[in-house]
Image (cartoon, rainbow, N blue to C red):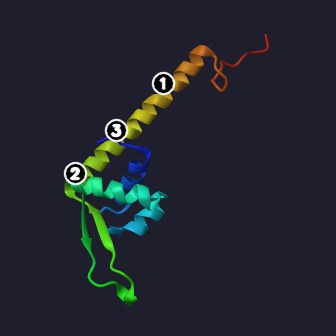
Amino acid sequence: MKLTGPLERVLRAFLADPAKPRYGYDLMKASGLPSGTLYPMLGRLQEQGLVSSAWEPTGADGRPPRRYYQLTDEGMETARQELARASAARAGAAAGAAAGARRTGAPGAARPARGNT
């Protein structure tokens, strides 16, 4: 799985409460993604067995029924692993960038304090 920014946002929304089924509009609000990005992604995740979905019985108050999505057990494990890998990569990149900036004297790099001698 290639972890893109939008996919990361959707996985984080699911993992905020993994036991809670989420419907599309709810995921759109939580992830900040438009429907044209979210629904194809949910379809791909479902094809990969990482997400399951089910239609609710007749919608409440006369509204159309909602389709609820939930991470499968495999989806939860995969999501946690991918997000942990992404966090570790960011931390490593940030540490490497800071070390490189110190070596090159780049703006914003930590510089040794100078005494008044």
Determine the secondary structure under disc 1: helix
Amino acid type, callout 3: Arg
Residue 19 seen by the camera: no
Q: Which residue is mark 3?
A: 85
Residue at position x 20%, y 56% from top?
Answer: 73
Specify few, some or many for label 2: CA neighbours under 10 Å numbering under 14, 14-19, or 20 or more. Answer: few
In this picture, is 42 found above or below 83?
A: below
| Residue 10: x %, y % from top left | 39, 55
Quarter of the rendering occupied by the N terminus: top left
Disc with the residue nearer the chain's start (2 vs 1)? 2
Numbered disc in front, either 3 or 2: 2
Residue 8 seen by the camera: yes
| Residue 49: x %, y % from top left | 20, 54
Determine the secondary structure under disc 2: loop
Q: CA separation, marks 3 and 1?
A: 16 Å
Quarter of the rendering occupied by the C terminus: top right
For residue 96, the mark is: 1
Q: CA separation, marks 2 and 1?
A: 34 Å
Amino acid type, callout 1: Gly
Residue at position x 40%, y 43% from top?
Answer: 4
